[in-house]
Image: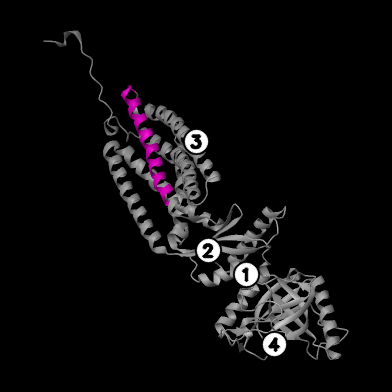
Amino acid sequence: MDKRPLIITLSLVMLVVLGAGIYLGMGARPNLGLDLQGGVSAVYTPQLPEGEAEPDDFEEIIDETIEVIRARVDSLGVAEPDISRSGTDVLVQVPGATDADRLAELIGTTAQLTFRQVLDIIPPGSENYDEGPDCLAPVDEREELGDDESGIVCGSPDEADVADPDTGEALPTKYELGPTELTGDRIEDAFPSIGQGTQNFTVGLDFDSLGGEQFAQVTNELACERDQGGIGQLAIVLDNVVESATSMNPEVACGVGITGGSATITTGAGLSPQEQEDEARDLALVLRTGALPISLEASTFQTVSATLGAESLQSGLLAGMLGLLLVGAWLVFFYRWLGVVALLEVAIFGVLLMALISALAQLGFALTLAGVAGIIVSIGITADSAIIFSERIRDEINLGKTPRTAVQRAHHSAWRTNLAGNTVTMAAAVILYFLAVGPVRGFALMLGIASVLDLLVMYFFARPLVFLMADRGIIKRRNVRAVEPVAPVTAGAKA
């Protein structure tokens, strides 16, 4: 037997294991799922305008909505959110999220931004204030203006300073607005900043080339209207609420307008500096990532505690460690040196699996409690592989083979058996992964990875190590508990 390929194979395996150990030692760890570290779990249902049928491209709209939500959540720096769909509902799971209210507002904000000319300002208490929408009603219950329509829109409640005599709630100013002059689709970038000469946060906007031309045109017309004694204000409408109605400064000349393709939204009136900054950042984020193509309503929105998950994880790990210790003790007691090899197989399998799971975290994988269950099951898979190999060696030695010959023949038979078993397991894991949803997919993924890894460890580590041990005489008939041969009885042995 040429031992050099076996030694080279073992050396390469140990180098890979050493690299995996260093990777884990440098702090690489799996990302934990929602059930293990807590966070926010929500289900959003698309809301179509009353009486409107589903469009033909409704499925594509839902997919686009998911991508917009994913971009918003990713921009917060949240680790590995799980954003998917169930039918037409959008499932959002954000592990580790602590500010649930902010996240809910961020996800649910449609961010439909339009710029419209102010035709009239209707303050609370004026004769025609009762016209138009009820500003005390929820925003999603107010009739929304189409891009080509003119009408009355409520101002931001943050800027309201007049109380309703009946309810005591603040009444915002109403604005009569013209058709849409410019939409948020033309925004290339949005960023928070501090306004010049004030400590208030604002949101700066940069338009694309066409948007810059449209913005210059509308501000040019408003500047001319101002010079003629008109209102000359531009309303910035976000999700059917006038966030600000800006007058044209004297520096904005009639016939020129505001060039350069940029604008500013003033936000956070009446808020603390920290609240202003958070609002400006969130508004800039939703404008930068784009508007939701459809309105969403949270069917469920709940904060999941990490306590139960942590306790379950500790229980699962404890069960796994106890099971591993019992299996290891039995293997060493029953198979002696082959049991030691089996323990090394399980140890190498564990190091490689943890390193692989930690690396998959960079691709968005998060370890859930179901995945932990898959890992525990995989320990049994690896132990079974070692037992099959050891039993085949015993069988061959019982048939009268020498340990060296028995190891070679046993591996051939055990490898075929193990390959068939792991192939069935991998097939089941693939079916589960693609047909199941939720935690079952995490279990299936761990089971599939473990099956492949088990085959690799058996072929590239256990096989060459056992071959070398048999060649050096370490593996003998006695230390694999083989049946001792019975001495033949001769005719004259009876006295």
- Which of the marked residues, 4 or 2, is nearer the chain's N terminus? 2
Disc 1, SS = loop
Q: Would residue 292 be found to the left or right of residue 483 on screen?
A: right
Look at the numbered discs 2 and 3 and tell me whether their residues touch, using CB distance below 8 Å: no
- Is residue 53 shown above or below 455? below
Decide which of 204, 46 is in the foreground and name it. Answer: 46
Disc 3, SS = helix
Identify the residue at image location x=35%, y=23%. Answer: 401
State the CA–CA distance, disc 3 to disc 1.
47 Å
Q: Which residue is mark 1?
A: 109
Q: Which residues are magenta?
A: 372-400
Q: Nearer the viewer, mark 3 or mark 1?
A: 1
Q: Nearer the viewer, mark 4 or mark 2?
A: 4
Q: Which residue is mark 4?
A: 123
Q: Would residue 27 be found to the left or right of residue 435 on screen?
A: left
**Residue 34 on image: x %, y %:** 47, 60
